[in-house]
Image (spheres, rainbow, N blue to C red):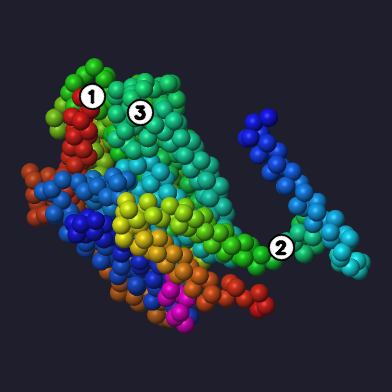
Amino acid sequence: MSNLHLLSFSPYLILCVAGLTVLLIEAFVRKPSQQISGYFSVFAQVIALALLWRQIFIFKAIEPVALFRHTIQIDGFGLFVNALILIAGILASIASIDYLRRQGVSHGEYHAFQLFAVLGMMLMVSSMELVTLFISLELMSLSIYIMCGYRRDNARGIESAIKYFLLGGFAAAILLFGIAHLFGQSGSTYLLDIARAMRTGLSVSGSTIGNPALMKLGMAMFAAGILFKVAAVPMHFWLPDAYDGAPAPVTGFMAAAVKAAAFAVLVKFLYFTSTGNPAETNPRITGLHPPFDQAILFFACVTMLIPNLIALCQTSVKRILAYSSIAHAGYMLVGVRCMANYRGVGGDDATAALLYYLMAYGLMTLGAFIIVGRLSGPNEERGQLDDLNGIGYRQPFLSLVMAICVLSMAGSPPLAGFWGKYLVFKTAVDNGYIGFAVFAIISSVIAVFYYLRILVHMYMRPAEADFAQEAGEEEAAGVLRGWDFKVSLGAIAFALIWLGMGPFTVLKIVPGSETLWNWSKVAAEALSNQHEFMSKMLF
Amino acid sequence: MDTNTFGVIFIFAVAVAIPAGALIAGRLLGPRREQPGKQAPFECGIANVVGGARQRFSVKFYIIAMIFLVFDLEVVFLFPWAVDFRALSRALGIVGFVEMFVFLGILFLGYIYLYKKGALDWEE
């Protein structure tokens, strides 16, 4: 392993070593050690992000780096999603230190699990081989299950962990079965070999594929396993309960990072396995096999519409946000559908729009969940809409950030969420799916109702006296101190506004605000360059 | 009868003979002191085997079982490494040697954690 390889793998190594160190801190430092572990975890993730940042600027110029016999590949696409995961991890860590302190938790193994979860996600996004991918997915999932049930004496937390664990285990089995079929037909678990088998109809050993239908079945099962993690609608039933019962920072972390990692894997997988007509020689063509394009279209439509309708009649803020996070997955699936359809130059726009959406969505959903956890009392017993009444005047800072996050989710123009929606829907229009785009816009208009409802409760309803007093006592007890928490929330709000000021060079109102869009495009191009490289190798 | 079939039959015979021999030798040579506890059914980790299934179990057994699993799996990985070490070190050099110790080191950290947390203290 050369120095370059070690450098590109260093963020992963740091997270792994930091996770183990947190366990040692827990074993040797006297209680309460939760905050020591927590700040150590934040520190490690910041270092990992800094190393990643360095690579992002190096890797603009040079080729992707393959590690460990090509099981892991570090490229522009993976780096973008890894950076998103790390940012979400840092923000969630800061919020969870505060959250656990208010709960009176003195031991901090939580932070070790979070580091392992981040490591699993980052490896999952970078892996080019399905067994490595599955192991990293399990590293992520198992850590997340434990984090969901971290409040051991809380019945809803346990319910959340059990439901997520059972259904997640089932989905993982389906995914693994899909991998087995792909391996059985193509003779390899490498994405590139499977892609070659898809295109040429020859397995690795050079013989023709025995049963191409099983290959498609394997693809479908793999996609189903990933769509479960994404929570596309027929596979979404675990999500409201899991999100509702988990500690709020974990919910935000799941909504932002797990979804980003799962989407990245879905995109990568579809990019490599999807082929147009094998007779066509244009290497940039990526098209899904006939049943899958319709399937993604169907998933996108129901995932946009149904959770928005269910969220209209929810009374718990966390459940509203949980359903809204399902709906956002639906909007992102529009991007996946268009990405898989594109023909011609500039087709990276759909992927770039999806990446931009992931980043914007990650920030706003994480912020919203963290604040709900902060506003609903130490044990989250006040999570109903009515409990938010008048909170805008008692907790002006938290409410302001919450309002920015919620408006951004609704797609209000000067915020990042607007550009995410705009870019994704624009690719749908560019691809000729006018009806699809109209459907998406109608769904997102329905969603505005329940987003505004949160704001109405926060700013336009009179407060309940007893809870106001309680909150006052909390403030008097000094619970609201903690500058790191405030800085992290302020950073989210600032980022949403700043990114919302115009991601295009034409609308360069705020200098640098178009950077994320450019960066998304670089990441998308990195993916399609790989695809092109692969196609050249095949034909 | 070819040698393969004979080998299978021979191993089968040995497999029957050893436990049977042990049981017979125990019956002939061992002292027999009957106690009620000896006659009771036994299963590791469950205090009352007879009775309803809705009883509480001591969590200690499960912790011990998990520790056992971890270190058992460690051995599973160690065996092929050790058996094929010569070929491995030709192919990978010092890396193949160091990597296994990284793996062992991580497991050892787990052991330290368990030890400090008191998972190995049966009496508590």
The image's mark for residue A246 is none
Q: Is residue A294 left or right of residue A81?
A: right
Which quadrant is home to the N terminus of chain A?
Answer: bottom left
Q: Residues within 10 Å of mark 1 (few under 14, many from 20)?
A: few
Q: Earlier in the sequence, mark 3 or mark 1?
A: 3
> Which SS class for mark 2?
loop
In terms of secondary structure, what is the magenta stretch mainly?
helix
Left or right position of A56 against A21: left
Please name the residue that numbered disc 3 is placed on: A205
| Magenta-colored span | A23-30
In this rendering, do the residues under marks 2 and 1 share a single chain?
no
Residue at 71%, 62% in the rendered image:
B45
Q: Amino acid at mark 1?
A: Gly
CA gap, disc 3 and disc 2? 50 Å
Q: Residue at x 36, y 61 (%)?
A: B97
What is the total number of numbered labels drawn onto the structure image? 3
In the depicted structure, whether residue A476 falls above or below residue A418: below
Q: What kind of element bears circle 1?
A: loop
Q: Which mark is residue A432?
A: 1
Tell which of A522 and A191 is nearer to you: A191
Near mark 3 (Cα within 10 A), the count class, few <14, some 14-19 or many ≥20, is: few
